[in-house]
Amino acid sequence: MAKAKKTPAILTKQMMFCPGCGHGLVLRLIAECLEELGQDKNVIFGIGVGCIGLAGNGLDADKFDALHGRSAAVCTAMKRVNPDTMIVSYQGDGDAYSIGLAETMNAAYRNENFTVIAVNNTNYGMTGGQMSTTTMPGQKTTTSTHGRNCDITGMPLRFPELVASQFPGVAYVARGTMTTPANVNKLKGYIKNAFEAQMNHEGYSIVEVLSPCPTNWGMTPLQSVERIEKELIPYYPLGEFKTREAK
Ligand SMILES: Cc1ncc(C[n+]2csc(CCOP(=O)(O)OP(=O)(O)O)c2C)c(N)n1
Ligand code: SF4
């Protein structure tokens, strides 16, 4: 009989995410990858401002709560002074791509050797579902009550594609999601690739995760998964945009 996988040691307490939220699963996959790579006692997280804060003490690892959007700058410093420590910048789309776009972009531009996990739920989840750079055209949020008008706000930002096309020296760029067991397995593979690239000092790595936010989308968890499949993936395709070069 198949055995259930043990919870990774750094996940110690129940976390307070909403039912159907994607953050818990992303953290679980990160923790599994770190443990399997023998890095779970050798990691510092840069933590963005947002619902990831609800992980609280449930994530038993060194972490630095960066000011809103500044995690990439903090992670740059942490990695430069601790080159053999795994540095993981865990951020939401509002944190990484809206308020912190400059820091996120500059770290990629400089090809800093750390890993960004960017949880894209197309809104600012923690503060009540405001519009972010990744909000879809026509999507209603608390700050785009008639639906996002891209004529005046620009089109949703595809950061992984931007990095892969404009900064080709980076180590690894991918986008995954968790809508099916197969997608969960692929996402775990992407996260592991990113961590391995960092361990080998190959440069900047980023994995974006399309993640449900049922609370602010006004949907059930199942409807949220369907929204990702039908609406988000056609605009935000899954896959690897920059693969690791054979070393
Ligand atoms: C400088 C600053 N501006 C605004 C806020 C308020 N704030 C806290 S969480 C948050 C939204 C975070 O959204 P996102 O990064 O997408 O993460 P999510 O909660 O969706 O996971 C905002 C705007 C803040 N803490 N600091
Ligand atoms: S508000 Fe959204 S992102 Fe935040 S915990 Fe709830 S479902 Fe998750």
Image (cartoon, rainbow, N blue to C red):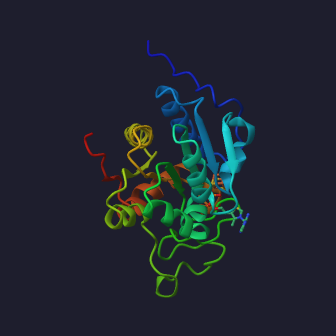
* Quadrant housing residue 232: bottom left
**Residue 105 at what x, y percent from top left?**
49, 66
Residue 22 visible somewhere in the drawing? no
Residue with the most extreme top position:
1
Would residue 35 be seen by someone viewing this image from the given angle? yes
Single out the residue that lies furthest toward the bottom. Answer: 152
Closer to us: 173 or 227: 173
Q: Nearer the viewer, residue 4 or 217?
A: 4
Q: As drawn, is 31 to the left or to the right of 178?
A: right
Q: Is residue 191 left or right of residue 66?
A: left
Farthest front residue in view: 81
- Locate residue 139, reporting x and y percent: 53, 72
Quarter of the C terminus within the rendering: top left
Q: Which quarter of the figure is the N terminus placed in?
A: top left
Can you tell which quarter of the image residue 228 is in?
A: bottom left
Instruction: Answer above or below: position of 107 versus 157.
Output: above
Image height check: is 147 above or below 239?
A: below
Looking at this view, is 212 or 52 the one in front? 52
In the rendered image, residue 212, in percent from the top left (x then y), is placed at 54, 53
Which residue is at 67% across, 37% downward?
59
* Residue at image coords 25%, 41%: 246
Residue at horizontal 65%, vertical 66%?
129
Where in the figure is residue 17, as x and y percent of width and height? 68, 46
